[in-house]
């Protein structure tokens, strides 16, 4: 779904510009926000994102 992305430094909060491939059906925020480490990303991804069939 994501073609390319670029991190833009505006000296306050960085922003990410994303180029999409095709159309998106639905977009939303994953909530609540948690601070997680790099080692925990895979387990949280499997828990929060919809399963692929």
Image (cartoon, grey):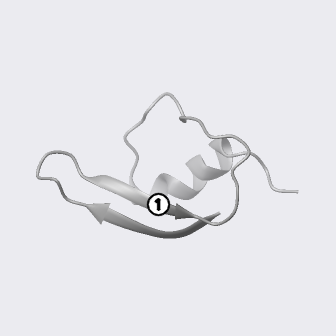
- List x then y, in percent, for residue 42: 57, 58
Q: Residue at x 30, y 52 (%)?
A: 15
Q: Quadrant of the N terminus?
A: bottom right
Q: Residue at x 49, y 28 (%)?
A: 32
Above or below, comparing residue 47 to residue 22 in the picture:
above
Q: Please state if 50 lies on the left or on the right of 27 as rendered.
A: right
- List x then y, in percent, for residue 34: 42, 36
- List x then y, in percent, for residue 14: 24, 52
Q: Quadrant of residue 20?
A: bottom right
Callout 1: helix, strand or loop? strand
Give the farthest residue toward the right.
53
- List x then y, in percent, for residue 22: 69, 63
Give the farthest residue toward the top.
32
* Frontmost residue, 6 versus 45: 6
Q: Badge 1: few (under 14), some or many (20 or more) residues near its Cα, within 10 Å?
A: few
* Frontmost residue, 5 versus 41: 5
Q: Please state if 33 lies on the left or on the right of 13 as rendered.
A: right
Q: Residue at x 37, y 40 (%)?
A: 35
Q: Please state if 3 lies on the left or on the right of 13 as rendered.
A: right
Above or below, comparing residue 15 to residue 2 in the picture:
above
Q: Residue at x 64, y 66 (%)?
A: 21
Mark 1 highlights which residue? 18
Q: Please state if 25 lies on the left or on the right of 21 as rendered.
A: right
Number of numbered discs overlaid on the protein picture: 1
């Amino acid at each position: 779904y994501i073609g390319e992305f670029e991190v833009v430094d505006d000296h306050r909060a960085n922003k990410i510009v994303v180029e999409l491939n095709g159309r998106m059906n639905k977009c939303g925020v994953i909530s609540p926000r948690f601070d997680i480490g790099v080692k925990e990303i895979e387990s949280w991804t499997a828990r929060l994102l919809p399963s692929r069939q």
